[in-house]
């Protein structure tokens, strides 16, 4: 990935984190990496453990940011979340996946989609 792309992603993650903190999320981890992939942010909110994917776009040329969280990406996030749950002894913890779409081209737009998709196979 190019440096500009990485910088855009980091900017979007920082904006998303600031917004989520104001909304009452408590950030537990940033850029959690394991062999299955990466989770941008892990937080607690309202008694739930929340795995957060941040998608940032500078223009609509490649579609809405939420369109990038396709079945393949959801699978990667689910596997990485299972790894985190097992590694931290939280396999019985209620969790959910939120997606934050950040558009920074022109006026800043930020959209949080709570419960964007489900963790499958026995995890709550």
Image: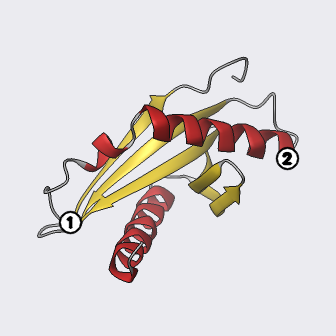
Image quarter where the C terminus lies is top right
Q: Residue furthest top?
A: 122
Q: Is residue 79 left or right of residue 72?
A: right
Q: Is residue 83 above or below residue 108?
A: above
Q: Is residue 78 left or right of residue 19?
A: right
Residue 12 placement (x, y as % from top left): 37, 67
Question: Residue sitting at 29 percent across and 41 percent down?
Answer: 67
Image quarter where the N terminus lies is bottom left
- Between residues 39 and 51, which one lies in front from this camera angle? 39
Residue 79 placement (x, y as % from top left): 66, 38
- The disc at residue 17 is none
Question: Residue sitting at 67 percent across and 47 percent down?
Answer: 36
Numbered circles on residues, count = 2
Asked if disc 1 and disc 2 are in contact, CB closer than 8 Å, the reply is no
How is the protein colored in the picture? secondary structure
Q: Is residue 119 left or right of residue 53?
A: right
Residue 90 placement (x, y as % from top left): 82, 38
Q: Is residue 34 left or right of residue 67?
A: right
Residue 51 placement (x, y as % from top left): 58, 45
Q: Could you tell which of marks 1 and 2 lies nearer the N-terminus?
A: 2
Is residue 88 in sight in this rendering?
no
Q: Residue furthest bottom?
A: 3
Q: Quick one: SS at disc 1?
A: loop
Pointer 2: what residue? 87
Distance from the alpha carbon under mark 1 to that under mark 2: 36 Å
- Between residues 18 and 84, which one lies in front from this camera angle? 84
Is residue 101 in sight in this rendering?
yes
Pointer 1: what residue? 108
């Amino acid at each position: 990935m190019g440096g500009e792309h990485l910088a855009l992603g980091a900017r979007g993650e920082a904006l998303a984190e600031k917004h989520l903190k104001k909304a009452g999320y408590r950030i537990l981890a940033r850029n959690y990496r394991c062999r299955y992939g990466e989770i941008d942010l892990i937080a607690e909110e309202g008694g739930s453990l929340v795995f957060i994917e941040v998608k940032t776009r500078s223009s609509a040329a490649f579609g809405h940011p939420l369109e990038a969280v396709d079945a393949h990406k959801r699978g990667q996030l689910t596997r990485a979340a299972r790894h985190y749950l097992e590694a931290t002894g939280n396999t019985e913890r209620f969790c959910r996946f939120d997606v934050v779409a950040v558009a920074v081209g022109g006026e800043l737009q930020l959209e949080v989609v709570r419960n964007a998709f489900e963790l499958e196979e026995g995890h709550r």
